[in-house]
Amino acid sequence: MTGELILGRSRECEALDALVDAARGGESRVLVLRGEPGVGKTRLLEYVTSRARGFRVALAASVQSGMELPYAGLHQLCAPMTDRLDRLPPGQHDAVGGALGPGSTHTPNGFLVALGVLGLLSEVARDRPLLCVVDDAQWMDRASIQALAFAARRLHAESVALVFAVRAPEEDASSDAELAGLPELLVKGLPERESRTLLRSVLPGLWDERVIRRFVAESRGNPLALLELPKTAGSVDLAGGFGLPSTSPLEERIERAYVRRVGGLPRRAREFLLAAAVEPTGDPALLRHATDRLGLDGDAAGEAEAAGLVKIGDRVRFFHPMVRSAVYWAASAEERRRTHRVLADVTDPAADPDRRAWHAAHGAAGPDESVAAELERTAGRAEARGGVAATAALLARAVELTADPARRQDRALAAAHAAHEAGNAELALKLLSLAEAGVLDDLRRGEVELARARIAFISDRGSEAPGLLLRAGARLAAHDAALARDAYLEVVNAAIFAGPQAHDEGQQQAAKAARLLPAPQPPRPADLLLDGLAVRILDGHTTAVPSLRRALRAFADPGLSPEEGLRWLWLICVTAVGLWDHETMSLLAARHLKLARDAGQATALPFALTMRCVVHVLDGELAEADSLAEEVQTVAEAVGTAAPIYGALFVAAWRGRETECVELSARADEGAELRGEGVGPVVSRWARALLYNGLGRHGEAAEAADMASREYSQLEMGIPVWALAEYVEATARSGSAEQAADAFDRLAESTRASGTDWASGIESRSRALLSDDAQAERHYRQALEALGRTRLRGESARAHLVYGEWLSRGGRRQDARDQLRTAHALFTSMDMRGFAHRAARELTTLGEDVTEDSDRARSDLTPKELQIVRLVREGLTNPDIGARLFLSPRTVEWHLRNVFGKLGATSRKQL
């Protein structure tokens, strides 16, 4: 049969042969075989397995059961590999161990599981090539398919071949989204000649050519249809081809053919097949217990097997998944429920409580509290194993079986939270609607509204979320003060993303509400932050500085819990920027990044990386910042989310790369249009102002800077204030200094109250640009002294630059040369080429012969190789680098061999 089905599959076989050959040669390859049911995908998997001589082969096959146990598919594929777990880094070891081991005490983080699976496949393939085959991937549990798809995208040089077989896109199939973008081969029907050959194998003898032609045409070359439809065709269909053509979809016709075959069997054989269809594991012993309870004898199994619909060996296997589906749905609802109840009764509650609860749930004809409670416990176990999607599905079924209104609301809320965590906003909103169906007290109503607001913020960081969060906080205030205050702090955070269009009103209302709701004693760090921000919003920046500094100290405390850190460190870093406190910002950004890395939080990591990237930019470490900006992109690609581009935008602006900066600015502007993320245009305009000031195009810089801050009635911390400094410099250098007076006053309100060297330096530099000749020099020198005491090398170099330009205009040529040489050297060392060119142009007008190194020789290292070299310089090992860049250690080794060859290096020390 395999040989017949491979007939006409030369294209597919060549692709699979190439995949095997590549893995045998040390590369890694991935292929998704996609096609309709019955087209021959499983036969192609058998073919590739037969070709993988000398390989270690791992197999997983999913079945459509309606039950999702987290990491069940991964357990099938990887459980035989657990002897290599000890080779993984500790965090990945614990995560994969927790996913594969039901008795593990570790709660696996999905991101770390995926990294661990990548490492595990790589380690297993060290001894000999590895072939991983996943059949019917559309039915694999979501946690498993996410981990395998992540690994598939990161495999490179590990001698691993990974093949998925999946049906053509189906509604609600998680595999469609997870496998999108991987190399894919569409498996189509057999050509006409091969179709005829296969059809004649089941229609022996002489048949009218019109019959043959009709079956071939209607089957569209589908091998299963060619084999099965003739077996149930009526006499008219087979008599001269006079039967009417079918208008039903092919899959439906095949399933109906199986239903007719099943309907022709004795009742006991049908009952046996239904029990086998209901029990998805294919365990013969468990099936035997169930059939005994149903009163079926051995003849029932024999009749079902003799019909060619099922095979009984070490496992019970249906001829095709469509047989299972046909058997299950051909039975009446009561027959299905009865069979599920029997299987629940015979399933060991100690060995497999989750499957027992699932069968009991499907055996229930209506609400049943005992079954719902058991499903709730099963959901708890799924959550402990990291299966948030399974948790949501189990709790959603528990809701359906719950009669008590209050308990139903509680379970619906819990299920909605789980669905939200799983990224299923549609299911979460549906469950919230169920929670709202009954009478809600104010506390539950507030919890529902808070959940809706959080979903809105994650789904669309636009202007809607602040208002929703505000309403939720107001409703919760009388019942759960801590939760209400968290909601008000989330309003402030959401308003920052929403930008000026939602900033003022939302933050004002949240601040007033927070002031009326005292913090618990002792206050949490989040309470101190909320109170400080409320003072800033209502009473101004100057008044708020002392309370905001208390909040900074609380978050800088080593005893800060990881949960609070992961939740609020991004916002407290923004607050540190607003206080011009570079030292604390640097400390907190580093802590945030470490927490996100340690926790493996793929959603928090891009924001933590971006904030740390900003710190490196401010310190003039653009290479390090660039590496982190690339890592943001790597994380986003790895987990399939949109990447924040702000770190890359900062780097491009400071480097003076106009094309790149303008392109990234346009993407930031698109975020406002697509997601209502109004902060995007603010950041993009500031970046363009910085870029154009560096390039000496001050008119364009002034226009961009003005647009970045003009819409705020009260300036937000960070970028809008920085834009004022750009505006002052741009207008001063373009001969319109009188336009900058108001901008300088707004800038000075922020810098003077903060009183740090960073703030003092920026204020003095800006004041010097607007001062007359009698006062300017004093302010320039103050700026140099203050910024010289910081790590802000870019801002310090800019102070030397504008001072040198002022000296040049005053005819003090030698003094000007000294300042401009210093500026040029600093900018060049930091690769800030726009500002370096500006300094060089001024030096040239002074008769200086400046050698530009824009054409200096560069190595031919790829961006990925440059990233790896930077991490080697930081002292990271290959496993550490792999974890950082989501590569296997073997891929890191492969890249390093290329680096050594290109640079002529022989050791890591030389790098």
Image (cartoon, helix red, strand yellow):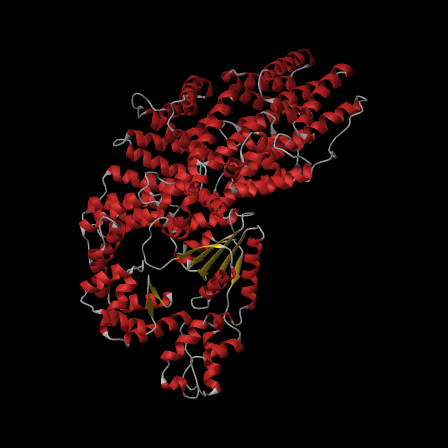
Res 13 quadrant in image: bottom right
Taking the spot 20% from the left edge, 62% from the top edge, the residue there is 338
* Residue in view at x 21 percent, y 47 percent: 373
Quadrant assignment, res 909: top right
| Percent of width and height locating residue 716 | 49, 28
- At 29% across and 65% down in the image, what residue appears? 328
Q: Where residue 663 sits: x, y (%)?
A: 61, 41
Q: Is residue 66 left or right of residue 781?
A: left
Which of the 4 image quadrants contains residue 814?
top right
Image quadrant in which the C terminus is located? top right
- Tell me: residue 408, above or below residue 243: above
**Is residue 816 placed above or below 595 in the rendered structure?**
above
Is 268 left or right of 39, judged from the image as shown? Answer: left
Foreground pick, 674 / 757: 757
Residue 334 can be seen, yes or no: yes
Which of 32 and 761 lies nearest the eye of the viewer? 32
Residue in front for this viewpoint, 329 or 646: 329
Please indicate, yes or no, whether residue 811 appears anywhere in the rendered image. no
Label tally: 0
- Position of residue 407 measured from the top left corner of the image (x, y, whole percent): 21, 44
Question: The N terminus is located in which quarter?
Answer: bottom left
Q: Is residue 286 above or below residue 893?
A: below
Q: Is residue 92 above or below residue 223?
A: above
x, y (%) of residue 851? 78, 27
